[in-house]
Image (cartoon, rainbow, N blue to C red):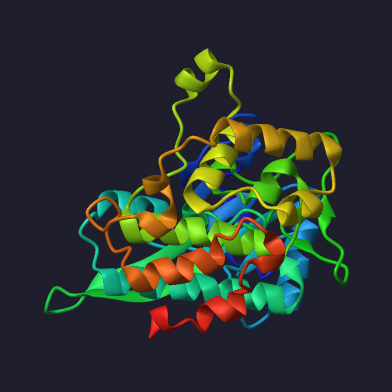
Amino acid sequence: MYSTVVCNSGRVYQRGKVLMSNPRDKDYDIYLAHCENKPYVLKRVSQSIFELCLQHKREFPDTRRIRMHVDYSEKEKTVVYEYFKEDLLALVRINRDFPLVARKQILFEVGKALQELHAKNWIHIDVKPDNVMVDWNLDEQGQVQIERVALTDLDVSLKLKGDKLLRIPNMQRLGNFMWRSPEAQTGQGIGKPSDVFSFGLVCIYTLTSREIMAVDHEELREREVEPEIEVLGRDIVYFGLLSEGLLKHTADETWQTVLVQVAEGVAGADPSFHLSNWQENDFPNIDAGAKKMLCRIMNLDPAKRATINEILDDPYWR
């Protein structure tokens, strides 16, 4: 692979270190690059994703909250993105004392990005902290200043046709299992509410610095439990009883049976695990206002889940 990439704009990007390695094909590693002494990110993609990137750019030409490419090479099927300081997953892990006001500011911007997508009937499908990029600095008084937040990685995003939901055949799923909604764990009935649920999980992580859906894969292998099933069980324990609404929404007999079995398996869980009973000493920053908002987001029934517009209008943000 050449050390430089000449894009359609005529600008030349000098490829640097690998930012993210692709385990299946090194040609698709993501690189740090420089042009005119400014850092960028180079990402080579498949033909279908390249076309999707161009479609995103046409649909959201002026957005700042959704990270769009700023240049591209049609010949090399490579897109160029602005470089951000770090992603939200790393930011929260490294900076445990990051101020609450800054955490809330970041989350509100992520919500606004989803609002932009949903307004044009797009769904992201892979909302998670490592798909949120953040630029921030300290001012002269040492206070955190959030400069920019952008939702990134729309590789599996989809523009819905009217009210039709995404149903994936053959037990396939999209996105990271830790951050999926219950319906997305089944691959059945994925829509805007699915993004909202994932956003709620991102809120919980960002506010508390706790990854409540992280699993021990070795332990699960010993128990012969799939990670997706473990997370579904936690959904029910943390956020409410299995509802008829979710079963009807899934509209798949196999998955309906699985959901009922999972619910039966966690029926004896301690009620203190439920979101409404969380204490701030265990879940930092989850006060009464945060709980009230999160309960609207984390409803297991997609039809009863608050929309992103409703969530952004919640008093919690004021």
53 vs 241: above or below: below
Coordinates of residue 65 in the picture (x, y in percent): 54, 75
User: Is any atom of residue 149 visible in this view?
Assistant: no
Coordinates of residue 31 in the picture (x, y in percent): 51, 48
Quadrant where the C terminus sits is: bottom left
User: Furthest-left residue in view?
Assistant: 141
Task: Name the image quarter holding residue 92.
Answer: bottom left
Coordinates of residue 47 in the picture (x, y in percent): 80, 50
Task: Name the image quarter holding residue 261.
Answer: top right
Viewer-proximal residue among 270 and 87: 270
Q: Residue at (46%, 32%) from the top-left corner? A: 215
Q: Residue at (41%, 46%) from the top-left corner? A: 271
Q: Residue at (51%, 41%) from the top-left corner? A: 234
Coordinates of residue 5 in the picture (x, y in percent): 61, 54
Q: Residue at (44%, 27%) from the top-left corner? A: 216
Left or right: 19 as drawn, with respect to 4:
left
User: Furthest-top residue in view?
Assistant: 222
20 vs 137: above or below: above
